[in-house]
Image: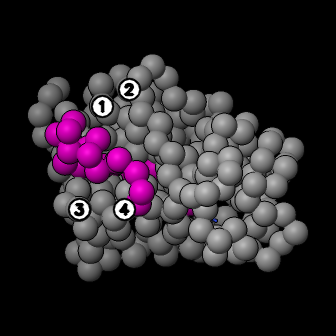
Amino acid sequence: PSGPRAVPATPYAFTHDPATTALVVIDMQRDFLEPGGFGEMLGNDVSQLQRVVAPLSATLAACRAAGMLVIHTREGHRPDLSDCPPAKLVRGGGDTRIGDPGPRGRILVRGEEGHDIVDELAPVGDEIVLDKPGKGAFYATDLEAILRNAGIRSLVVTGVTTEVCVHTTVREANDRGFECLVLEDCCGSYFPEFHEVGLKMIAAQGGIFGWVAPSGAFLDGLV
Ligand code: TIU
């Protein structure tokens, strides 16, 4: 089918048209999902994020088949770290820092293996890959221009981590007038309780900055 459809969601149905909806996949990088990267450097158990890969892979395939705009983001910095705020560079307190060598190359640096997206979710064809220096995908990027030029009104937001880059991006998008549906099983956190409460914060107060649904509810209405 074509045209608008309603996805059963919290706090109420999310109405969108796939022709004006983009799938946004946030930071599904080795640096966050695999040992030896930025996520582990910060003291996290990176295995917590693995459960996101399978449902997100299925969602990505369905959105591609539906002809939706797909945008992948990656958090990271220029090799000379000139776009990394000193405050971010020193944060974390560990021995290893952004830019230091790791098992998959320099940590959180563009062009390194660890910085790239995991194989299962690799971009295909002309899908947009957007490099961002911060947590939000709108900060210091051309994301807003890309979305407006493509006539996008709604975002289906996925990726990691729920309460950091996903939340920041959804807040930024909401303030810019985009309607956001967050797929609960397609995002994840190193802290299960932050994931749960992070999702609640989005949909509370009548959907204060978005909607939340399982990917199945979104995919059921897509094809
Ligand atoms: N540390 C953490 O939870 N997240 C990040 O640093 N970046 C993203 O969420 N992508």
Tag 1 secondary structure: loop
* Labels 2 & 3 near each other (Cβ < 8 A): no
* Circle 4 or circle 3, nearest the eye: 3
Q: Which residue is mark 4?
A: 170
Q: How dense is the environment of label 4, judged by Cα within 10 Å: few (below 14), some, or many (20 and up)?
A: many
Q: Which residue is mark 2?
A: 64
In the figure, residue 209 lies in which quadrant?
bottom left
* Labels 2 & 1 near each other (Cβ < 8 A): yes
* Real-space CA distance between mark 4 and mark 1, rounded to the nearest whole angstrom: 19 Å
Query: If you read the primary sequence from the N terminus, does the residue marked by circle 4 or circle 1 appear first?
Result: 1
Task: Kindly identify the amino acid type of the residue bearing the numbered disc 2.
Answer: Arg
Identify the residue at image location x=17%, y=26%. 1
* Labels 4 & 1 near each other (Cβ < 8 A): no
Q: Which residue is mark 1?
A: 68
Protein image colouring: one colour
Query: If you read the primary sequence from the N terminus, does the residue marked by circle 2 or circle 3 appear first?
Result: 2
Which residues are the magenta region? 139-161
